[in-house]
C-alpha cells in the first residue's frame, strides 16, 4: 500500500491510495490515514490506484468515517475502481461515505 498526501486550496487534503488495502497493509494505512483525519477538516481519499479492499481495509475506512464524524469533519472517497465500488456497494459502505466518480467532483463538494 502506498499513500501520498497533498494539500489543495480550500483546506482540502487529498490522500491517494495505491495498491491493495488488505490485512497486510491495513494497520499501517489506518495509522497514517487516522493522522490525516485528526489533523485536517476536509479529506478526500483518492482510490484511483487502489486495486483491492478486503474486510480489514473496510474496517479501516469505517474507523476513519466514524472518527471524522466525531470531529465534525468531512471525508469523501473518489475514483473507486469498479471492483472496489462493487465491494463498497455490496457491504453498504457506499451509503456511509460520500463517493464521487472523480477527484474534481469530490473536492468541489467539499468547497
Image: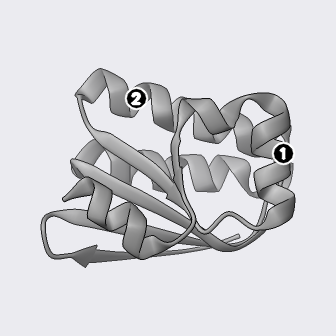
Which residue is drawn at the image coordinates 81% and 30% (left, top)? 91
| Above or below, 97 relative to 83 | above
Q: Is 45 or 92 nearer to us in this picture? A: 92
Q: Which badge, 2 or 1, is on the more N-terminal residue?
A: 2
Q: Is 9 or 111 nearer to us in this picture? A: 111
Q: Residue furthest top?
A: 70
Q: Quadrant of the N terminus?
A: bottom right
In the picture provided, is 42 more to the left or to the right than 20? left
Give the residue number, with chain letter if any, for mark 1. Answer: 87
Q: Quadrant of the C terminus?
A: bottom left
Image coordinates of residue 36 in percent, x first then y, are 35, 54
User: Badge 2: how crowded within 10 Å, few (<14), some, or many (20+)?
Assistant: some
Give the residue number, with chain letter if any, for mark 2. Answer: 67
Image coordinates of residue 81 in percent, x first then y, are 76, 67
Numbered disc in front, either 2 or 1: 1
Instruction: State which quadrant residue 47 falls in.
Output: bottom right
Image coordinates of residue 59 in percent, x first then y, are 69, 33
Which residue is drawn at the image coordinates 31% and 42% (left, top)? 74
Which secondary structure, mark 1? helix
Which residue is drawn at the image coordinates 77% and 39% (left, top)? 89
User: Badge 1: how crowded within 10 Å, few (<14), some, or many (20+)?
Assistant: some
In the picture provided, is 50 more to the left or to the right than 32? right
Report the colour scheme: one colour
Find the distance from the CA under tag 2 to the CA under tag 1.
Answer: 22 Å
| Above or below, 37 relative to 103 | above
| Above or below, 41 relative to 50 | above
Which residue is drawn at the image coordinates 15% and 75% (left, top)? 9
Amino acid at each position: 500500500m502506498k499513500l501520498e498526501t497533498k494539500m489543495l486550496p480550500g483546506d482540502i487534503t487529498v490522500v491517494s491510495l495505491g495498491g491493495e488495502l488488505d490485512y497486510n497493509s491495513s494497520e499501517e494505512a489506518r495509522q497514517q490515514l487516522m493522522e490525516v483525519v485528526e489533523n485536517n477538516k476536509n479529506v478526500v481519499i483518492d482510490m484511483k490506484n487502489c486495486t483491492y479492499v478486503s474486510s480489514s481495509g473496510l474496517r479501516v475506512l469505517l474507523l476513519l468515517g466514524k472518527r471524522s464524524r466525531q470531529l465534525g469533519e468531512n471525508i469523501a472517497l473518489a475514483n473507486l475502481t469498479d471492483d472496489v465500488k462493487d465491494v463498497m456497494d455490496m457491504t453498504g459502505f457506499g451509503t456511509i461515505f460520500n463517493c464521487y466518480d472523480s477527484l474534481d467532483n469530490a473536492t468541489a463538494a467539499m468547497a
